[in-house]
């Protein structure tokens, strides 16, 4: 140590002092503004992804992901409220064979919610515990995390796949939603499992039609619990027509599309018919007011979110059409502003309201230590937002890099999917938790940005050497 200090000239001491002082100030700033945690997270991600070889990484990832989610559901315990409470209470009734919930106006209007009720009732038959429902949420989300790894590995390479999947593991929005009885975890896993099978070249290579039969079935099952399957079906068809037409015959594309649509339709319509036949739902899985989401989504005053003021139009098709026209076609400037606001809030905002809002009113015990719930909520929201911003920027960098560089055309499937979600949520009601499914695709596209930057860094190193 003495020899080190002896080598330093006296004239450089002021420089070293100022450098250390400013570094300390910068470190304190990072800690105060919570940036330090995000830096540590991405430091771990980069080190593990690019410097360490982990055998059977997908299994390790699943276990680590599962442990982090289990920790979340043990520490964060939000009350069951809103639609989730209605569906949970209905699930408890269905578990014991009580079908009185079918008389509720909620399920008569929104029959598509019965799919989630049935799913929860079946789980409650196995184990009558809310905690058990949350464990299954953890399993599904951990499965989605592994799917990100497998998809990116197939499209790019393992190092980048490790980075993007680890980033998703640290992304708190879906992690903390495992504490909520939302209907998004299992459907999202099934939707992206279907996409993985479609892009997997060596899966059903000799019988590609079977691949689309399975994909349609998986999306159909997911759609029973959350009616977003049509976005995936249309995205796959658009991908086949717009991207695959150069390498495949029209007859093959037509057959794949037909099998996809038929398998999806048979599952969804068959289940809807079964629910109605066995008196589980008075209207199957049908939505009795499909225009309602558009009424809410075009309300400038509520920024496209739920508004009690719009309840006067509910279940009145004529009035709903009139108000939608009034807010869009007859007022294009205001609607344009609304679309800009909705795009910003839906894709850029991050809020852990559904899982964390209760923390603002009570303390939380973490490892036998009582902490301010409001302070914990503040830290969690900051980390969540910072991780997402980094990933969002990486996704944009990745998309820009595709303009000039050659890339695997299968990536277009996720670009089309995200584009479809972007358009849909410009028109219908938006809510923070609705971002759950499309943001999986953002993490997949962020891997392209990671891959591009890693290549640029390698090129710079070569130039310096």
Image (cartoon, rainbow, N blue to C red):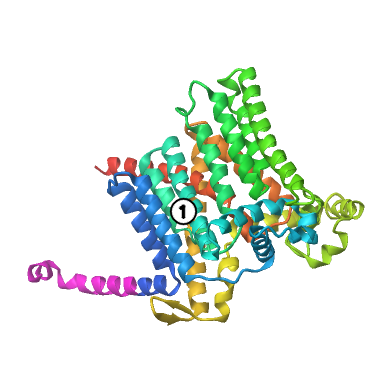
Please state which of residues 189 and 164 is positioned toward the viewer in this rendering. Answer: 189
Q: Residue 250 appears in which quarter of the rendering?
A: top right
Question: What's the magenta region?
Answer: 1-24
- Say which residue appears at 37% left-offset and 41% top-offset: 158
Q: Is residue 170 left or right of residue 52?
A: right
Task: Give the answer, above or below, for where 209 lies relative to 350.
Answer: above
Instruction: Return the x and y of residue 284 as percentages of the image width and height.
Output: 75, 47
Q: Is residue 41 left or right of residue 196?
A: left
Q: Is residue 384 left or right of residue 50?
A: right
- Name the residue carrying label 1: 168
Q: Residue furthest front?
A: 97
- Say which residue appears at 74% left-offset and 63% top-offset: 306
Please state which of residues 361 and 227 is positioned toward the viewer in this rendering. Answer: 227
Q: Residue 71 appears in which quarter of the rendering?
A: bottom left
Q: Residue 194 appears in which quarter of the rendering?
A: top right
Task: Give the answer, above or below, for where 38 lies relative to 10.
Answer: above
Give SS at disc 1: helix
The verdict on residue 87 being magenta is no
- Say which residue appears at 63% left-offset and 60% top-offset: 432
Instruction: Return the x and y of residue 455 as percentages of the image width and height.
Output: 37, 41
Q: Badge 1: few (under 14), some or many (20 or more) residues near its Cα, within 10 Å? A: many
Figure disc tally: 1
The verdict on residue 4 being magenta is yes
Q: Main secondary structure of the magenta part?
A: helix
Instruction: Return the x and y of residue 381 as percentages of the image width and height.
Output: 52, 68
């Amino acid at each position: 140590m003495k020899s080190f200090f002896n080598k330093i000239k006296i004239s450089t001491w002021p420089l070293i002092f100022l450098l250390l002082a400013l570094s300390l100030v910068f470190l304190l700033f990072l800690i105060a503004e919570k940036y330090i945690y995000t830096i540590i997270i991405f430091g771990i991600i980069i080190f593990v992804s690019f410097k360490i070889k982990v055998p059977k990484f997908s299994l390790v990832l699943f276990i680590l992901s599962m442990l982090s989610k289990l920790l979340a559901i043990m520490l964060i315990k939000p009350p069951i409220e809103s639609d989730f409470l209605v569906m949970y209470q209905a699930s408890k009734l269905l578990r014991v064979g009580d079908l009185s919930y079918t008389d509720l106006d909620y399920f008569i209007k929104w029959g598509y919610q019965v799919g989630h009720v049935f799913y929860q009732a079946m789980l409650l038959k196995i184990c009558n515990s809310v905690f058990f429902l949350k464990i299954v949420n953890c399993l599904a989300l951990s499965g989605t995390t592994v799917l990100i790894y497998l998809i990116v590995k197939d499209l790019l390479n393992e190092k980048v796949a490790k980075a993007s999947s680890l980033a998703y593991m640290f992304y708190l929005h879906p992690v903390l939603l495992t504490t909520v009885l939302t209907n998004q975890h299992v459907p999202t896993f099934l939707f992206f499992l279907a996409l993985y099978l479609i892009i997997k070249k060596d899966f059903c290579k000799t019988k590609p039609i079977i691949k689309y039969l399975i994909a349609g079935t998986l999306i159909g099952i997911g759609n029973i619990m959350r009616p977003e399957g049509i976005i995936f079906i249309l995205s796959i068809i658009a991908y086949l027509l717009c991207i695959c037409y150069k390498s495949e015959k029209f007859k093959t594309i037509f057959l794949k599309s037909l099998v996809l649509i038929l398998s999806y339709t048979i599952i969804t319509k068959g289940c809807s018919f079964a629910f109605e036949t066995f008196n589980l739902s008075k209207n199957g899985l049908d939505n009795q007011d499909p225009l309602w989401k558009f009424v809410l989504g075009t309300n400038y005053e509520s920024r496209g979110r739920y508004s009690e003021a719009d309840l006067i139009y509910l279940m009145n098709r004529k009035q709903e059409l009139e108000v939608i026209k009034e807010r869009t076609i007859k007022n294009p400037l205001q609607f344009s502003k609304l679309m800009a606001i909705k795009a910003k809030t839906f894709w850029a905002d991050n809020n852990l309201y559904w899982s964390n809002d209760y923390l603002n009113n009570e303390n939380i015990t973490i490892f036998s230590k009582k902490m301010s719930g409001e302070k914990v909520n503040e830290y969690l929201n900051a980390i969540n937002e910072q991780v997402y911003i980094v990933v969002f920027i990486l996704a944009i960098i990745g998309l820009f890099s595709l303009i000039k560089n050659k890339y695997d055309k299968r990536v277009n499937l996720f670009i089309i999917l995200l584009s479809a979600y972007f358009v849909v949520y410009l028109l219908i009601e938006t809510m923070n938790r609705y971002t759950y499914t499309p943001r999986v695709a953002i993490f997949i596209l962020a891997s392209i940005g990671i891959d591009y930057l890693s290549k640029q860094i390698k090129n710079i190193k070569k130039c310096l050497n």
